[in-house]
Image: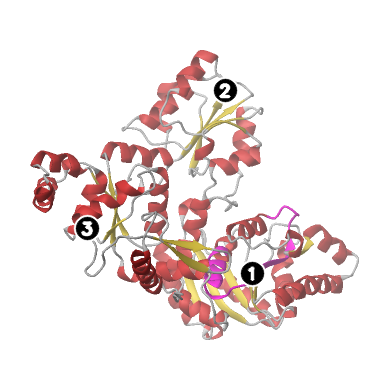
Amino acid sequence: MAESLYITATEARSGKSAIALGVMELLLRKVQKVAFFRPIIGNEADNDIELISSQFQLGIPRERMYALVADEVNRLVSAGREGEIIERVIEKYRYLTQHFDFVLCEGTDFTSSTAAFELDINAEVANNLSSPVLLVANAHGKRSTEILHGIDMALDSLADKGCHTIATIVNRVNLRQKSNILQLLAQKEKLRSQLLYAIPEEESLGKPTVGEIAKILNAEVLYGKEQLDRHVYNFTVAAMQLQNFLPRIEHGSLIITPGDRADVIIGSLAAVSSRTMETISGILLTGGLRPEPPIWQLIRGFRPLVPILSVKENTFPTAAVVDKIHAIISPGDERKIMQAIALFEKNVDVEEFSERITRIRPTIVTPKMFEYELVQKARRKKRHIVLPEGDEERILRASEALLKREVVDITLLGEKEKISSKISELGLHLEDVSIIEPSEHPDFDDYVHSYFELRKHKGITIDNAHDLMSDVNYFGTMMVFKGKAHGMVSGAVHSTAATIRPALEIIKTKPGISIVSSVFFMCLKDRVLVYGDCAVNPDPNAEQLAEIALTSAQTAQAFGIEPIVA
């Protein structure tokens, strides 16, 4: 029979979906077949089902992932047919246990008319599913005594229903409270056998994105569709003159203004480009109005151009709706998803937690297991990686995700002003990343002379060396050669030849190897395969093929994949 875990919260907006992301990420590293199940959902378009299903590509029919909608539950309760609720939940749950190794269950959202009774409902369901419980408490804006009181009440309710609570996570904790909260929890007798964790508040997870706001308002996206993941930290209604409005711009502001206020629109976009102003998240035009064509022509020339939305409603009713919008983690919002997972991994002992919730031991390496082992090895060694394509969007977004998860130290190469501008344009948090402009670096001349000494027998002059070392791939390779970085990752925009040529000239092959080859890690649905060589040697002879096979096998072994070479 499948194992399971039931996640329930003490109240609404506890960050339960973020915890579910972290737990599912952890489970898929240990268990091959994992299902996600919500016994009761608020409505048929359930965000968490879509989020988990799409993020982890579960491939489970949506109707199999929930049992009842809240309105159905209310009707059954009103008709005195409470027993039917549990029967339908068990029926749906049993199907999943027959087809999967583990079922992760997520309880209700505490946003319906039955919110006062929802903890009891969740306890009843968890008990009937014989599922251990993970309790998530909301610490946002609360004193320690309030947090502890809420946890006490929830645990008593769960115990009264016969539930076995194996862990409590206090979520959205003020960082200054964290250690104190954990100490107070550890002193409670009823929590002695539980795993206890506290996860600090992450401001960006609690803020909606421009895309979320656009969806709720049914707004038309006029510009900036590729930047809808920018976080909105506050909003400003711009109904005053430009000179009075500009001082009110804050970092991450959404500017709400009538569509005919060309002065405010242009001033806001100018603020994005200005080094002396805060960067806004977007502009929301109201009243169904748009600037005249000459103004649009001017607007299209701004770089960077943040998202510009348009709604038919007037300014103040629109602002009132925006003020009531609560942040969610939407399907496809990779930044928030990675932030949530990184926060979970940083504050939860994932090995301890996984040992407690599952006894299943994997027999193959799935993509999630493969990624997990990579991240854990990298985190333990915390290497310094240089990225020559420092102004490329994918590189910058990946850098933010890796730094959030504390996997590596990163140096970006390229023009400092261009990279900083791109980071600001994308709204990324890379304040601590190192940026090097090769020709301006103190070691540049040393690198030039080192390359000249290595290649002068090939006819390279000092001027040639100077020109080549200005190339980011050559500079990055020399950093590795000199021990200033442990590794280099390139090839997002550069060709394979441009990426590996500097390594062939400077670092060369290891002793005993006559040919350079490559491997691809092919992450299939249920396993990871090593393909070699797909990029470097188009027509190897028999001896070279044998060497490629052996080095590919060694690479596979180094990455935790058992090589089988025929």
Rounded to the nearest whole Å, what is the CA distance between mark 2 and mark 3? 53 Å
28 part of magenta stretch: yes
Q: Residue 239: where, in percent of width, then height? A: 52, 25
N-terminal of the pair, mark 3 or mark 1, is 1
Q: Residue 482: where, in percent of width, then height? A: 16, 58
N-terminal of the pair, mark 2 or mark 1, is 1
Residue that sits furthest to the front in the current view: 542
Would you name the residue on which mark 2 appears? 259
Would you name the residue on which mark 3 appears? 480
User: For this view, does 258 lie left or right of residue 412?
Assistant: right
**Quarter occupied by residue 117:** bottom right
Q: Nearer the viewer, residue 476 or 79?
A: 476
Kindly tell me whether residue 178 is visible in this rendering.
Answer: no
User: For this view, does 85 lie left or right of residue 345?
Assistant: right
Colour setup of the view: secondary structure
Residue located at (33% from left, 45% from top): 389
Say few, some or many: other residues with alpha carbon within 10 Å of mark 1 (under 14 / 14 to 19 / 20 or more). Answer: many
N-terminal of the pair, mark 2 or mark 3, is 2
62 part of magenta stretch: no
Question: Which of pointers 3 and 1 indicates the residue nearer the eye?
Answer: 3
Say few, some or many: other residues with alpha carbon within 10 Å of mark 2 (under 14 / 14 to 19 / 20 or more). Answer: many
Mark 2 belongs to which amino acid?
Gly
The answer to whether the residue labelled 2 contacts the one labelled 3, judged by CB atoms less than 8 Å apart, is: no
Would you name the residue on which mark 1 appears? 8
State the SS at label 2: loop
Q: Which residues are magenta?
A: 21-46
